[in-house]
Each structure stands twice: as structure tokens, then as C-alpha cells.
Image (cartoon, grey):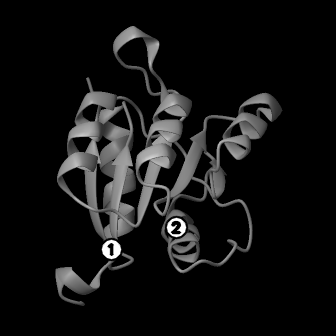
Amino acid sequence: MKPAKDRAKILVVYKHPSDLLMVSCQLRDYNVEALSARSVALAEEALLRWSFELVIIDHSMTGVMNVGGLELVKYVKRYWPATKIVFLLAHENEEARQGALDVGVEHILVKTSDAHKIGAAVLDVVRGRKPQQNFGFSCAAELG
């Protein structure tokens, strides 16, 4: 495994604890340093503290005054324009997809059953390549 300083640093912003853990664990298999945030406020704190090559943002994120996933994308692109973003959608949604692309999202993942492939798609985005296909993952059941 590469030393931490040589690995891509990725922030995963996801509101469901079980899904957040699943995505973070999947990324570790691809030799990246994955930090996680369960809220928009925690994501902002992490962004102000560390530098990230990529941020994975769940469309369904909500925060104070209904600041959600798309607003977080706009914030990241305004203050850290070189940071790449992968946007997660629960299902195919043309309006949400187009809105994300309009504000500079590099790639959109639709949550499907191919959990093991998210890391490969994320690495492609970090390396500046277009992912081969729209890989995604299935949501794990919410922990009780």
C-alpha cells in the first residue's frame, strides 16, 4: 500500500451511516485515503481543514436551511474549483443529472448493485479519465 501522502484524498459526503461506511470501505480497497462526513456542516469543516482531489456527494444530502447535495457541489466548485466531484443519485433522474452537470460535476453514479466497482470509477475520475461506464452501488440497509 502506498504511503498516505501518495494516495488520493477523497471526501465522502453521505447521510446514511451504513451506506457511508460501505462506500468508504470500498474506496480503501483502491488505495485511496477516504474521509467521511455525515452532514453538510461536517463536509464544510473537512474542506476547510484538508485538501481533497475528489469529493463524493450524495444527492439526497440535506443540511441547515435545506442546503443539500447540489448546493454543496456549487460550494465546492466555487471555493475549490480544481476539486473533482462524483455525484450520487438514488435512481435515474434526468433533472438532477442535468442540474449536477450544469454546475460542474465530473461524473454521476447511479446506485445499482455493482458495489465493488465504485472504486474503479472514482479512480478514473481522480486520474482525469472518463469512467468506462456508469458504475454504482446498492444501498445497504439502514442500521437500526
Q: Please give the label number shown on residue 32.
A: 1
Q: Position of residue 5 (x, y in %)?
A: 20, 82
Judged from this view, the residue extending furthest toward the bottom is 2
Q: Mark 2 packing: few (<14 Cα in 10 Å), some, or many (20+)?
A: many
Q: Which residue is mark 2?
A: 122
- Residue at 33% across, 62% down: 52
Q: Position of residue 84 (x, y in %)?
A: 51, 61
Disc 2 secondary structure class = helix
Q: Is residue 78 above or below residue 131?
A: above
**Occupied quadrant, residue 98:** top right
Quarter containing the N terminus? bottom left
Disc 1 secondary structure class = loop
- Residue at 63% across, 58% down: 106
Q: Amino acid at mark 2?
A: Val
Q: Please give the label number shown on residue 78.
A: none
Q: Position of residue 33 (x, y in %)?
A: 27, 69
- Residue at 39% across, 53% down: 23
Q: Is residue 94 left or right of residue 143?
A: right
Q: Earlier in the sequence, mark 1 or mark 2?
A: 1
Q: Is residue 128 above or below residue 47?
A: below
**Occupied quadrant, residue 18:** top left
Mark 1 touches mark 2? (CB < 8 Å) = yes
Q: Amino acid at mark 1?
A: Val
Q: Is residue 118 above or below residue 8?
A: above
Q: Position of residue 80 (x, y in %)?
A: 42, 54
